[in-house]
Amino acid sequence: MLALTRKKGEALVINNNVEVTILEIRGDQVKIGISAPKDVPIYRKEVYLQIQKENEASINANSFEVLKNLV
């Protein structure tokens, strides 16, 4: 993991096409802005993990149905 120190108004660039800017710092919360192409999905981590979990459940359910239909 790369750890960087940024101040309000400062930014960093990821992969030449994603820019993350520090918009506001209030206590222990940091508000960030993300500029990226529309084809780059951006999720909060807890949402991303939930999507992965649901996708895995769907794959497992579909696999069971395929096996059931073979019998």
Image (cartoon, rainbow, N blue to C red):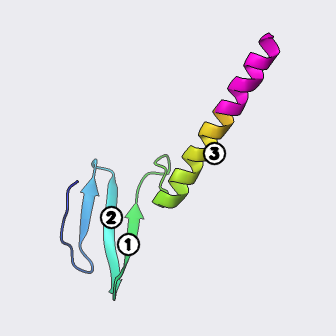
Name the N-terminal-most of marks 3 and 2. 2
Which residue is found at the position 47% from the left and 55% from the top? Answer: 42
Q: How packed is label 2: few (under 14 Cα within 10 Å), some, or many (20 or more)?
A: some
Neighbor class of circle 3 (other Cα within 10 Å; few <14, some 14-19, many 20+) is few
Amino acid found under the numbered disc labelled 1: Ile
> Front-most of 51 and 38?
51
| Residue at 24 percent of width and 62 percent of height | 12
Q: Are marks 3 and 2 in contact (CB under 8 Å)?
A: no
Q: Position of residue 6 (x, y in %)?
A: 21, 73
Q: Which mark is drawn over residue 54?
A: 3
Q: Position of residue 34 (x, y in %)?
A: 40, 64
Amino acid type, label 3: Glu
Nearer the observer, disc 3 or disc 2?
3
Relative placement, left or right, of 3 versus 64 is: left
Residue identifier under label 1? 32
| Distance in Å between CA atoms under marks 3 and 2 | 28 Å
* Residue 18 in which image quadrant: bottom left
Identify residue type, mark 2: Val
Q: Nearer the viewer, mark 1 or mark 3?
A: 3
Q: Is residue 39 depicted above or below 27 in this figure?
A: above
Look at 51% across and 53% down and name the residue there: 48
12, above or below 65, in the image: below
Give the magenta range: 60-71
Residue to which mark 2 is pinned: 20
